[in-house]
Amino acid sequence: NAGVTQTPKFQVLKTGQSMTLQCAQDMNHEYMSWYRQDPGMGLRLIHYSVGAGITDQGEVPNGYNVSRSTTEDFPLRLLSAAPSQTSVYFCASSYSVGGAQGFWGDEETQYFGPGTRLLVL
Amino acid sequence: KNQVEQSPQSLIILEGKNCTLQCNYTVSPFSNLRWYKQDTGRGPVSLTIMTFSENTKSNGRYTATLDADTKQSSLHITASQLSDSASYICVVSAYVDSSYKLIFGSGTRLLVRP
């Protein structure tokens, strides 16, 4: 198993450009999510999906779009990049979530990808 | 406000020494608490998951403790190794704003020197 993979590892964008961060998992996990990690702050949830065709907003969704057409893939799209989106982005997955409310069960482990470091100039 | 605060922000210890990292949370109601290890340039990796009824849980040289009454957790690392150099993140699961969420601390950066 490759686990959770993310591409690219690094990316530099100019303000206003768009791009897609790719995320894939081969563990047949239902739940996938995107986080951003900024210095001095905890990971913040951008968007999440509880299964193919179902997505929802997290804590900081503005400026980002997601879709989930397959169980394996969960791409994150930046529509018009801004310097405030400079960050490290992590994709994560877990086997299941107890319903659409996202109950984090006591045995529910998240698996994180290696991250994408994004710089917006 | 639901928060997870970790201390210290950073810590330097010598190889072979023990250390303890702290996590205080104000999240309520509380479901479970997790500790993650994040190596530089990598994603977080789960170390332990503790429910409110558990006081102690070990994973090799890592031992997590939880006091649900005082809303405090600690991660104790025994006989530290150079490979323990990483950030350690405390995460609390709670029912907030009509849904279950994971609330992440900002982490403690540990450096183990030879």
Image (cartoon, rainbow, N blue to C red):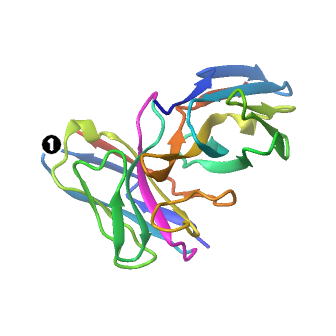
Figure check: A20 above or below B65:
below
Quarter of the image with the C terminus of chain B is top right
Magenta-highlighted residues? A27-40
| Residue lying at 34% horizontally and 61% vertically, measured from the top left | A56
Residue topped by disc 1: A15
Quarter of the image with the N terminus of chain B is top left
Q: Is residue A28 magenta?
A: yes
Figure check: B33 above or below B109:
below
- Please provide percent x and percent y for residue A79: 18, 55
> What amino acid is labelled 1 in the image?
Thr
Q: Nearer the viewer, residue B30 or B21?
A: B30
Q: Is residue A120 left or right of residue B78?
A: left
| Residue lying at 57% horizontally and 30% vertically, measured from the top left | B26
| Residue lying at 38% horizontally and 67% vertically, measured from the top left | A74
Mark 1 surroundings: few (<14), some (14-19) or many (≥20) residues within 10 A: some
Q: Is residue B29 left or right of residue B56?
A: left
Disc 1 is placed on an element classified as loop
- Please provide percent x and percent y for residue A41: 45, 31
Q: Nearer the viewer, residue B109 or B15?
A: B109
Can residue B61 be seen here? yes
Q: Quadrant of residue B81?
A: top right
Q: Outermost residue, left direction? A: A16
| Residue lying at 55% horizontally and 66% vertically, measured from the top left | A98
Q: Quadrant of residue A107?
A: bottom right
- Please provide percent x and percent y for residue A80: 15, 50
Q: Is residue A38 left or right of residue A61?
A: right
Q: Nearer the viewer, residue B55 or B28?
A: B28
- Please provide percent x and percent y for residue A5: 49, 64
Q: Is residue B4 magenta?
A: no
Q: Chain of mark 1?
A: A
Figure check: B55 above or below B11:
below
